[in-house]
Image (spheres, grey):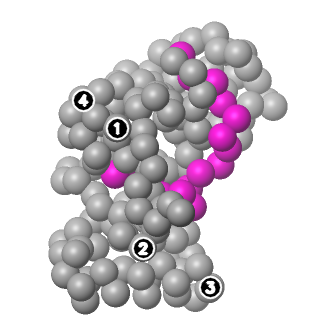
Amino acid sequence: MRNGAVFTERCARAALKRERVRPARYLSIQRCALISPEASPRPSPVCSTVSPAYLPNCHRTYSCIHCRAHLANHDELISKSFQGSQGRAYLFNSVVNVGCGPAEERVLLTGLHAVADIYCENCKTTLGWKYEHAFESSQKYKEGKFIIELAHMIKDNGWD
């Protein structure tokens, strides 16, 4: 196991010990492969989860500004230099507590993409979109990634 995975598992165990995170929630995190890529194989991207997933309390997380549901771990952040429909947005490798709408083709700043709007599973607020397909070869790295607009998320846990 690599250092990041050991640290993450240690944090999760510490949280369980303090009873801030119930074992069922911890299993939910493992199912979503958010503990670390090294700890478990990453499943194919799934847009929605059955029950709310809770990220470990010892990590910096991003949450829905409207209902405070966890959305993403800071470790999953790829880039802060994206533009959403309502201002700045962040690109994430994976997210939790998010549902997807149907995919549609849109012309964005970087060209034609097939995207699906994503929304908070808890409060149903539209948060951004998921890149399903990029038509230009230089944009292929975005496929399967998620955009969340800053207007819809806040920083939680451990931000000093």
Query: Dot 3 surroundings within 10 Å: few (below 14), some, or many (20 or more)?
Result: few
Judging by the rendered image, the residue that carries numbered circle 2 is: 58
Q: Residue at x 73, y 20 (%)?
A: 110
Q: Position of residue 14 (x, y in %)?
A: 34, 87
Please state which amino acid type lies under the numbered disc 3.
Arg
Is 138 placed left or right of 50 in the picture? right
In the rendered structure, the answer to whether residue 99 lies left or right of residue 19 reads right
How many neighbours does mark 2 have within 10 angstroms: few (below 14), some (14-19), or many (20 or more)? some
Mark 2–mark 3 Cα distance, whole angstroms, equals 18 Å
Q: Which mark sits nearer the N-terminus, 2 or 3?
A: 3
Q: Earlier in the sequence, mark 4 or mark 3?
A: 3
Residue 78 colored in magenta in the image: yes
* Mark 4 Cα-neighbour bin, 10 Å: few <14, some 14–19, many ≥20: few
The amino acid type found where label 4 is placed reads Lys
Looking at the image, is mark 2 or mark 3 nearer the viewer? 2
What's the distance in space between the residues labelled 4 and 3, CA to CA?
A: 37 Å
Tag nearer the camera, 4 or 2: 2
Binning the other alpha carbons within 10 Å of mark 1 as few (below 14), some (14 to 19) or many (20 upward) gives some
Amino acid carrying label 2: it is: Cys
Which residue is denoted by mark 3 in the rendering?
Answer: 2
First in sequence, mark 4 or 2: give its number: 2
Residue at the limit of the structure toward the front, as seen here: 160
**The magenta stretch spans which residues?**
70-85
Amino acid carrying mark 1 in the image? Ile
Taking the spot 34% from the left edge, 51% from the top edge, the residue there is 70
Q: Nearer the viewer, mark 1 or mark 4?
A: 1
Viewer-side label of 4, 3: 4
Q: Are marks 4 and 2 in contact (CB under 8 Å)?
A: no
